[in-house]
Image (spheres, rainbow, N blue to C red):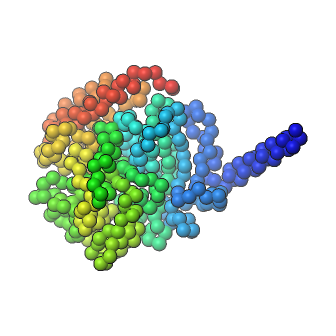
């Protein structure tokens, strides 16, 4: 009996000292979160492996180049969903948020979680000062929705050899998306979206396109424009681009296992280069001729490797360009808008009131309310006020798929929530 008591005491002491060590070393070691879930410990650890020396890692900001060892990226493991059967493989959704993009990103995440059917794993890359706000907001969501997703918050990091080059490319943090296959090595497939995206159809619908990839395809994106005569790339690009009008990288579906394994054709060498070998040489060659940064690099890559891309219709990435001079997205005319992309800040000004109306409706919606009477009906009324604009004239397209999607949400909303 004494032997068992002694062993028990030794284990308890080891646990106490281990906890104190981790507490003293980790930045997020005792961060309080909301939702009545008590205090959680968030571990800061290397993304590539479960290291035994995680307490010796150092936390770096977006202006630094990452750890000095072989891993230039780190991640913060944050929160797992509770009270849900996750036997089905979850969908992975990634976003990058910098500067004043907190509310916009949360609104995008709300649209994704609210409409999706399968569970979601959210990968949120954000500046360090935004992490606590993300945690507070996500943990405040009702448990019935909170159980639908896990999330991980990551710092903004770039390869340390060329961090300064990548940071200043196009907008702050924009090129982070290029390194997702290298950071999220344990993730097979992923949906990446810009923070100014709104899902009007479940993420499941986009995710299902993975099953339509042929043997060579490893990514899916929509064209930058439908009409070459007025498309930006066909008129102004000073570098190679995909297809007739280029591609828009605001919504990307990726098989990252294939990306990591592929040797990409290019115009620099006679042999194919891996993803991590390709990015910096392309930047060095074309940086003086690029306007849209990382999107231009993706256009160059898929110009030389068109067989690797599944081109999806414009209703998967519907932007003001599709209606600002009259409707030119045929698939949206037929099926409605699946994903709304409010680029050029149209959610936050009065230039495109139809886009802003959708954004405001989802942003203001409370999870505890009936989604039809509290979201869809007020939105339809607001859209009727936008018909003087070209995009407003197509207002029916903005709610066609959303109404269908909310029919499923409505059934869940009628059930009592856990909080």
Residue 371, given in percent of the width and then of the height, sits at 34, 27
In the foreground, 206 or 348: 206
Front one among 333 and 271: 271
Q: Which residue is at the front of the view, 309 or 280?
A: 309
Residue 315 visible in the displayed image: yes
Residue 269's place in the image compared with 114, above or below, is below
Furthest toward the left, the residue is: 229
Residue depicted at 59% across the width and 47% down the height: 42
Can residue 172 be seen in the rendering of this structure?
Answer: no
Q: Residue at x 13, y 58 (%)?
A: 228
Which quadrant holds residue 261? Answer: bottom left
Residue, x 14% and y 44% (percent of image)? 330
Q: Residue furthest right?
A: 2
In the drawing, does residue 364 fall left or right of residue 403? right
Percent position of residue 359, x then y? 31, 39
Q: How many marks?
A: 0
Find residue 338 and report its horizontal and vertical position in percent. 26, 41
Camera-side residue of 140 and 55: 55
311 lies left or right of 168: left
Residue 203, compared with residue 215, is above or below; it is above
Give the answer, above or below, for where 398 lies relative to 296.
Answer: above
- Which quarter of the rendering shows the N terminus? top right
Tell me: 354 left or right of 271: left
Q: Residue at x 53, y 65 (%)?
A: 71
In this rendering, would 418 be left or right of 195? right
Image location (x, y in percent) of residue 385: 20, 32
């Amino acid at each position: 009996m004494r032997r068992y008591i002694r062993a028990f005491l030794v284990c308890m002491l080891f646990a106490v000292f281990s906890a104190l060590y981790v507490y003293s070393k980790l930045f997020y070691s005792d961060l309080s979160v909301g939702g009545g879930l008590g205090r959680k410990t968030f571990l800061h650890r290397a993304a590539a492996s479960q290291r035994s020396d995680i307490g010796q890692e150092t936390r770096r900001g977006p202006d630094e180049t990452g750890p000095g060892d072989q891993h230039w990226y780190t991640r913060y493991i944050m929160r797992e969903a509770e009270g849900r059967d996750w036997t089905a493989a979850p969908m992975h959704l990634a976003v990058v948020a910098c500067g004043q993009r907190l509310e916009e990103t949360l609104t995008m995440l709300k649209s994704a979680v609210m409409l999706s059917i399968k569970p979601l794993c959210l990968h949120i890359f954000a500046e360090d000062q935004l992490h606590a706000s993300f945690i507070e907001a996500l943990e405040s969501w009702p448990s019935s929705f909170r159980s639908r997703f896990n999330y991980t918050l990551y710092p903004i990091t770039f390869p340390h050899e060329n961090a300064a080059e990548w940071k200043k490319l196009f907008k702050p943090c924009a090129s982070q998306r290029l390194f997702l296959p290298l950071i999220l090595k344990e993730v097979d497939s992923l949906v990446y979206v810009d923070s100014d995206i709104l899902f009007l159809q479940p993420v499941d619908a986009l995710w299902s396109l993975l099953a339509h990839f042929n043997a060579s395809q490893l990514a899916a994106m929509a064209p930058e424009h439908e009409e070459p005569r007025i498309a930006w790339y066909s008129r102004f690009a000073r570098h190679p681009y995909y297809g007739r009008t280029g591609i828009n990288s605001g919504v990307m579906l990726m098989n990252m296992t294939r990306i990591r394994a592929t040797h990409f054709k290019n115009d620099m060498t006679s042999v194919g280069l891996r993803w991590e070998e390709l990015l910096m040489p392309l930047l060095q060659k074309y940086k003086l001729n690029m306007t849209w940064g990382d999107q231009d690099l993706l256009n160059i890559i898929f110009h030389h490797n068109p067989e690797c891309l599944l081109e999806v219709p414009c209703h998967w990435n519907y932007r003001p360009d599709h209606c600002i001079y009259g409707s030119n997205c045929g698939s949206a005319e037929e099926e409605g808008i699946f994903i709304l992309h409010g680029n050029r800040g149209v959610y936050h000004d009065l230039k495109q009131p139809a886009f802003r109306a959708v954004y405001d409706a989802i942003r203001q919606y409370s999870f505890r309310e009936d989604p039809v009477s509290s979201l869809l009906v007020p939105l339809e009324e607001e859209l009727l006020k936008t018909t003087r604009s070209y995009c407003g004239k197509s207002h029916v397209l903005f709610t066609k798929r959303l109404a269908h999607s909310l029919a499923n949400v409505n059934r869940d909303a009628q059930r009592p929530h856990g909080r």
